[in-house]
Image: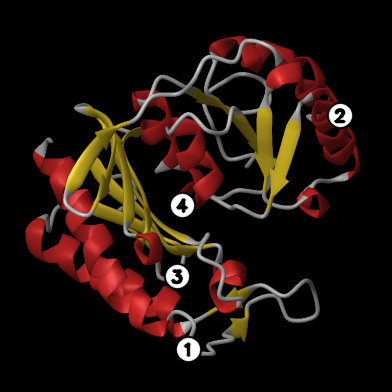
Amino acid sequence: MTPFEAFAVDLARAAAAVTLPLFRTGLTGDDKNAGGAFDPVTRADRDAEAAMRTLIAARFPDHGVVGEEYGSDRPEAEHVWVLDPVDGTRAFVAGLPLWTTLIGLRIAGRPTVGVVAQPYLDEIFLGGPSGARMIRGGQDTPLAVRACPRLNDAVIATTDPDLFTGAERGAWTQVRATARLARLGCDAYAYAMVAAGHVDLVAETGLKSWDWTALVPLVEAAGGQVTDWLGAPPSGDGRILAVGDAALKDQALLTLRRAVD
């Protein structure tokens, strides 16, 4: 494990020390999207990000930070930590253990280290230069995507089809109709399952940098690929496609790229 990978694990544990005591305690949070679909933010989100920022400032004072709750600090730095303290806050307030803490490290603009942590299940999924692994109960388990060259045989996921626009939703519906099985509502945990070889494809839209930066190193270190809906590296348009088997990418993109404006 590299020093940056070890520090990312430390950040995940610091966030868990904040979030776990608050999970299933009745937190409902404030609505960040008044008048629209309920988009909660809770004390767990804010305090966990604050805890991680404090550790980063103490250990790497020259590093930048981009976080969902407290914005950007030196986002153009050579090393930038990208934080989502509670990805899946709706799941958190519903008591469902599918929310995660996302920690990514960009080096020279490239996502290089990624953590997807689910503290209630005691799972830390880590990807980086030393490979992909799941840390649980003090044990490290190597991670690898599985072979699935045909979309007809694939298990696929997205958080919520209602998040897609008309054209996007049509594309997702076509991909879903081809795949063997689709699961919904897993947020970033679905990408951890790609890395672990249980899910074959995830497609989503509307993601911010803190939603996807940590996912790229994890899936790639396990042998998968993460792109936008045109097959290019993820960008600011928020459309993400992750596949375990590279053969699935072109099959999915035949449909998904038609939905890109």
- Alpha carbons under labels 4 and 2: distance apart: 30 Å
Look at the numbered disc 4 and give the secondary structure of its residue. helix
Disc 2 designates what residue? 177
Label 1 or label 4, whichever comes before in sequence order: 1
Q: Position of residue 198 (x, y in %)?
A: 53, 33
For residue 18, which quarter of the picture? bottom left
Look at the numbered disc 1 and give the secondary structure of its residue. loop
- Alpha carbons under labels 2 and 1: distance apart: 39 Å
Disc 1 designates what residue? 25
Give amino acid for label 1.
Thr
- Alpha carbons under labels 1 and 4: distance apart: 26 Å
Residue 69's mark? 3
Disc 4 designates what residue? 210
- Report if the CB atoms under discs 4 and 3 are less than 8 Å apart: no
Q: Residue 107, relative to residue 67: is it above or below?
A: above
Q: Nearer the viewer, residue 62 or 50?
A: 50
Number of residues whose C-alpha sits closer than 10 Å to that of mark 2, classed few (under 14), some (14–19) or many (20 or more) = few
- Point out the frontmost of discs 1 and 4: 1
Give amino acid for label 2.
Ala
Q: Nearer the viewer, residue 62 or 251?
A: 251
